[in-house]
């Protein structure tokens, strides 16, 4: 019986210490596994995202899976993949390019930080769907936009912090997820992200959501460099993740550290592959 050994790393992204930030698994492949097998591995990992990378000349091909589905863009798992490449696979390099469903994504090391360059996403005002308002509770948003996710703007950070989401109502929406945002008390803006359709009830820190948040707040505040905070139950009410970000033309820049929580090996037999 043939056995495939897949190196796997678990990286806490957008943080300078383990057990904080957003955890992502990174699996190193020689070639793509069947999609159903990669989805099963992501479900087994039960992390917000599992990244799979395959070497492609001087770059890497990259795909992301939540426990429920493949997604087109993920920030923290890209940061985790870059950490693995630039720490373990090619530590002499200063940057890496990933080819993804969202185009080429470049991640560069800046000392202890990694800088990610992602596409800026457009957004347009919409009337909030009934399930969106039901799912976010009694506070009335000042505006709602449609992008990759619904972007729901509130007047105050306290409103963002106080939302208790109805996951069933939010899972009935047509977009990937819901990001709620407001001016920050200690940052330019704050946010939270809910993705029940992705099997992510609340994400600790969501790089891809900032692809719409950064253009919105850069335009509203009239400055291209921003300081962001994201809240989540993983961090509790007293801990937050601070994110340096900015808008450069049609690209969004995100900066963050990463720490390795663990490393191991997945052992898959031919039977395991054929069962999926």
Image: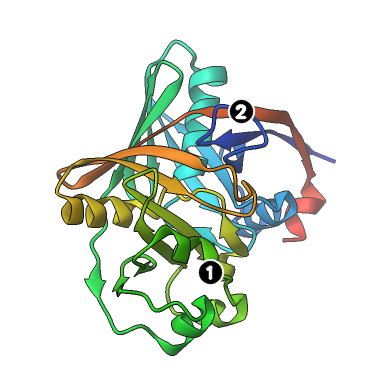
Residue at the location (69% across, 51% down)?
41
Would you name the residue on which mark 1 appears?
A: 163
> Residue 30 has which mark?
none
The label nearer to you, 1 versus 2, is: 1
- Quadrant that contains the N terminus: top right
- Per the model, the C-alpha gap separating discs 1 and 2 is 27 Å
Residue at the location (63% across, 49% down)?
236
Indicate left or right for 90 with 274 as reference.
Answer: left
**Quadrant location of residue 68?**
bottom right
Viewer-side residue, 238 vs 276 = 238
> Residue 17 has which mark?
2
Residue at the location (56% across, 82% down)?
169
Q: Can residue 180 be seen?
A: yes
- Look at the picture and state if 189 lies above or below 151: above
Indicate left or right for 163 with 179 as reference.
Answer: right
Do the numbered discs 1 and 2 sit on residues whose CB atoms are within 8 Å?
no
Q: Which residue sits furthest bottom?
A: 130
Sequence order check, earlier mark of 1 and 2: 2
Viewer-side residue, 19 vs 158 = 158
Viewer-side residue, 44 vs 223 = 223
């Amino acid at each position: 019986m043939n056995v495939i050994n897949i190196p796997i790393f678990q990286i806490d992204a957008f943080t300078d210490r383990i057990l904080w930030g957003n955890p992502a698994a990174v699996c190193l492949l020689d070639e793509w596994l069947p999609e159903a097998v990669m989805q099963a591995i992501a479900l087994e990992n039960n992390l917000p995202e599992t990244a799979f990378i395959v070497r492609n000349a001087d770059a890497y091909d990259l795909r992301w899976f939540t426990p429920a589905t493949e997604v087109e863009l993920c920030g923290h798992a890209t940061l985790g993949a870059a950490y693995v490449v630039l720490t373990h696979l090619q530590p002499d390099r200063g940057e890496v390019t990933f080819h993804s469903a969202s185009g080429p994504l470049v991640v560069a090391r800046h000392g202890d930080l990694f800088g990610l360059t992602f596409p800026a996403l457009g957004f347009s005002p919409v009337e909030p769907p009934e399930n969106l308002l039901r799912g976010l509770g009694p506070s009335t948003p000042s505006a709602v936009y449609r992008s990759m996710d619904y972007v729901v703007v509130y007047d105050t950070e306290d409103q963002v912090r106080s939302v208790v989401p109805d996951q069933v109502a939010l899972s009935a929406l047509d977009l990937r997820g819901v990001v709620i945002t407001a001016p920050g008390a200690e940052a330019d803006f704050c946010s939270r992200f809910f993705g029940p359709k992705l099997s992510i009830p609340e994400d600790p820190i969501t790089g891809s959501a900032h692809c719409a948040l950064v253009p919105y707040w850069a335009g509203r505040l009239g400055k291209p460099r921003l300081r962001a905070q994201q809240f989540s139950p993983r961090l509790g009410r007293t801990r937050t993740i601070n994110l340096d970000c900015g808008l450069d033309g049609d690209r969004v820049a995100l900066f963050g550290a990463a720490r390795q929580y663990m490393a191991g090996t997945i052992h898959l037999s031919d039977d395991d592959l054929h069962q999926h």
